[in-house]
Image: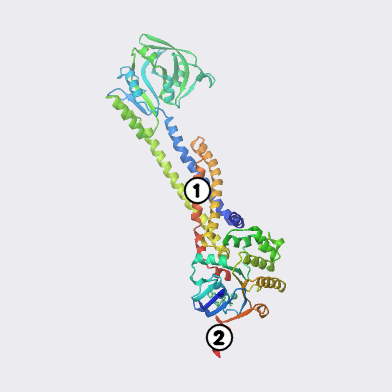
């Protein structure tokens, strides 16, 4: 009988309940969309920040090196020592580590900064790099990269009229190295003015076997986790300068915290507004139901049984509204992802029970006016005054 | 055998109105009592207290061994569900429930529903082909018959009918009175409020109220 009564109650008040349902659906839509964004955005933003490149740098004692420092006279580090300590302190959070040796070589009598590195590691380190290989996109991955491969910065390529697949001769002092242009690099940064070649080739060319100037690393995690990792590396490389590139990590943390706060306060606000909408509907409904309640009491219905019936009705309202809202919210989140963050947002299914539960609770809170029905005196109601 | 209903010096005051002013009487099981008296004499108030819809200011109202005045809210609800069957002048059916569901509602608050039994009760009041109708689709007489079926469904000790034919035309009045007569014949105890002397005559006994007192008692005092 309970489901039957519930169904009749819902049907008989569908006009009023529809208004409350729209409020619940709207609330659930925005909340589930915001939650979806919130759950997904930390991952997305973290990924996005990590796209930016290295966030940890190891430089020789006494002087911080950047990849733009070009002089061969700069202080050097022993490649094997640094690599050994990185391997020893390795954590799963370490995405990549690339050693760099910079020299200024000449190409057709034009001086160019040449960075010797491990090209594969450098690419992982800088995921925003765009490379033009002159091959169909799917080919390079299947093509083994030879030792003489060079990644040539966009500006260098334009100035020296270099194209993928073409030959390239590097000159340093009286030594030369015959290379092949592997790809043209569009980094949008200083790398566009450089040539990247294999570390051993550059070390040989420069006569600096086993020497590097700087090691760049990319480590996953919060700024404090990165700092902690830097500290442990620093301990195993006494005297070396191990530094997080702070700007990125901290901006990341701050932005994430602020978005979370913003989204949570918006969700709270929407919950309150939804509850108020349901409240208004239920207050009107409670007035309309006085006669029914008086009669139900006369028939022997206890307050808890009668109010339980109405609460179940409101619960259904919250659950149905929550469910519909969740579906709409996922769509809204997709749209927001594309329009606002320029990335698709992964639907998070745990949002369904969460949002539905919130909507049921909020609807129940909105059903507070039904409490007044408990005080109804059947004798007064049945008298018909 | 103890009387089914025992009322002792029952008083009920509203704000400054004395609706019942020391009423005492007993009703034996199986009796059909007509409660009569002018408007405002306290008939409805009496019925409401006996049915556990209202509580007396003082005095005792014992129904089937239970002093109604001593029950709390939940106790009253249980009492109404188990011992009382109401028939009201304005029918008081739930408008969005069918005739069948209105009867089943009483079953639901009593214990468990039994659709077959509810259909049977409606058949008994001659509404076999009206079970799926909403109150709005039924005539006044039919609605009151649904109310009678509802009052019967839980086999109550006491049927309380407050002017059950007050809103009915003569034909329907006849049908409802015939039902009450049948119920009486089966041994049900009925307290029925009525204005009409002709209806009052059908009962075993009349209790006359005036100004919240038994009229006979009232008269006796004056003598
Ligand atoms: N809830 C109430 N509040 C105030 N006065 C009431 C209430 N119920 C009944 N009365 C008064 O009590 C008296 C008896 O009422 P009632 O029992 O309804 O009379 P009857 O049913 O015989 O017409 C009347 O004067 C009525 O106005
Ligand atoms: Mg009356």
Lateral position of residue A204 relative to residue B171, left or right: left
* Residue A227 shown left or right of residue A313 in the figure: left
Q: Is residue B41 visible?
A: yes
Residue A24 place in picture, x, y as percent: 53, 50
Quadrant of the rendered structure where residue B166 is?
bottom right
- Circle nearer the viewer, 2 or 1: 2
Q: Quadrant of residue B32?
A: bottom right
Q: Secondary structure at mark 2?
A: helix
Q: Is mark 2 within 8 Å of ligand 1?
A: no
Name the residue beneath numbered marker 1: A357
- Indicate which disc residue B218 carries: 2
Give the crowd class for mark 1: few <14, some 14-19, many >=20 residues within 10 Å: some
- Parent chain of label 2: B
Q: Quadrant of ligand 2?
A: bottom right
Residue B195 x/y as whole percent:
64, 78
The residue that appears at 35% across and 30% down in the rendered structure is A245
Element class at badge 1: helix
Name the chain under label 1.
Answer: A
């Amino acid at each position: 009988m309970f489901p039957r009564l519930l169904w009749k109650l819902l049907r008989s008040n569908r006009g009023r309940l529809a208004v409350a349902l729209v409020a619940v659906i709207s609330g659930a839509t925005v909340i589930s969309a915001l939650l979806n964004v919130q759950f997904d955005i930390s991952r997305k933003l973290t990924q996005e920040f990590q796209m930016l490149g290295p966030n940890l740098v190891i430089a020789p004692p006494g002087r911080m090196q950047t990849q733009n420092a070009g002089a061969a006279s700069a202080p050097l580090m022993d490649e094997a020592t640094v690599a050994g300590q990185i391997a020893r302190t390795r954590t799963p959070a370490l995405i990549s580590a690339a050693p760099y040796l910079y020299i200024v070589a000449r190409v057709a009598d034009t001086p160019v900064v040449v960075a010797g590195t491990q090209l594969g590691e450098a690419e992982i380190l800088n995921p925003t790099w765009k490379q033009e290989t002159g091959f169909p996109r799917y080919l390079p991955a299947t093509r083994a990269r030879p030792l003489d491969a060079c990644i040539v910065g966009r500006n260098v390529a334009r100035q020296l009229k270099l194209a993928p697949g073409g030959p390239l001769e590097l000159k340093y002092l009286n030594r030369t190295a015959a290379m092949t242009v592997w790809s043209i690099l569009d980094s949008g940064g200083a790398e566009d003015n450089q040539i990247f070649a294999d570390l051993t080739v550059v070390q040989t060319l420069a006569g600096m076997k086993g020497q590097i100037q700087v090691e760049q690393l990319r480590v996953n995690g919060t700024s404090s986790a990165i700092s902690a990792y830097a500290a442990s590396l620093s301990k195993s490389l006494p005297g070396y300068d191990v530094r997080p590139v702070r700007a990125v990590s901290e901006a990341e943390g701050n932005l994430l915290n602020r978005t979370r706060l913003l989204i949570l306060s918006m969700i709270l606000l929407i919950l309150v507004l939804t509850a108020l909408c349901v409240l208004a509907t239920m207050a009107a409904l409670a007035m309309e139901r006085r006669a029914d309640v008086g009669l139900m009491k006369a028939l022997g219905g206890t307050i808890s049984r009668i109010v339980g019936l109405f609460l179940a009705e409101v619960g259904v309202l919250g659950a149905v509204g929550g469910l519909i809202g969740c579906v709409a919210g996922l769509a809204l989140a997709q749209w927001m992802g594309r329009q606002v963050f320029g990335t698709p947002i992964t639907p998070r299914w745990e949002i369904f029970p969460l949002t539905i539960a919130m909507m049921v609770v909020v609807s129940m809170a909105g059903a507070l006016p039904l409490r007044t029905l408990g005080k109804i005196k059947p004798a007064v109601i049945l008298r018909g005054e | 055998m103890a009387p089914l209903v025992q009322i002792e010096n029952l008083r009920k005051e509203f704000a400054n109105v004395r609706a019942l002013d020391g009423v005492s009487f007993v009703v034996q099981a199986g009796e059909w009592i007509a409660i009569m008296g002018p408007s405002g004499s306290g008939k409805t108030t009496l019925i409401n207290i006996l049915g556990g819809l209202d509580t007396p200011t003082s005095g005792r109202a014992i129904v089937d061994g239970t002093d109604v005045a001593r029950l709390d809210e939940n106790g009253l609800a249980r009492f109404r569900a188990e011992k009382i069957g109401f028939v009201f002048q304005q029918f008081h059916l739930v408008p969005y429930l069918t005739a069948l569901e209105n009867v089943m509602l009483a079953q639901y608050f009593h214990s468990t529903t039994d659709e077959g039994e509810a259909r049977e009760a409606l058949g008994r009041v001659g509404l076999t082909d009206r079970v799926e109708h909403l109150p709005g689709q039924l005539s006044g007489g039919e609605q009151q018959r649904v109310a009678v079926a509802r009052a019967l469904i839980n086999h109550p000790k006491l049927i309380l009918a407050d002017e059950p034919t007050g809103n009915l035309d003569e034909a329907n009045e006849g049908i409802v009175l015939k039902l009450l007569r049948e119920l009486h014949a089966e041994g049900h105890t009925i307290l029925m409020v009525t204005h009409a002397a002709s209806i009052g005559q059908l009962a075993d006994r009349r209790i006359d109220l005036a100004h919240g007192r038994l009229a006979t008692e009232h008269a006796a005092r004056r003598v």
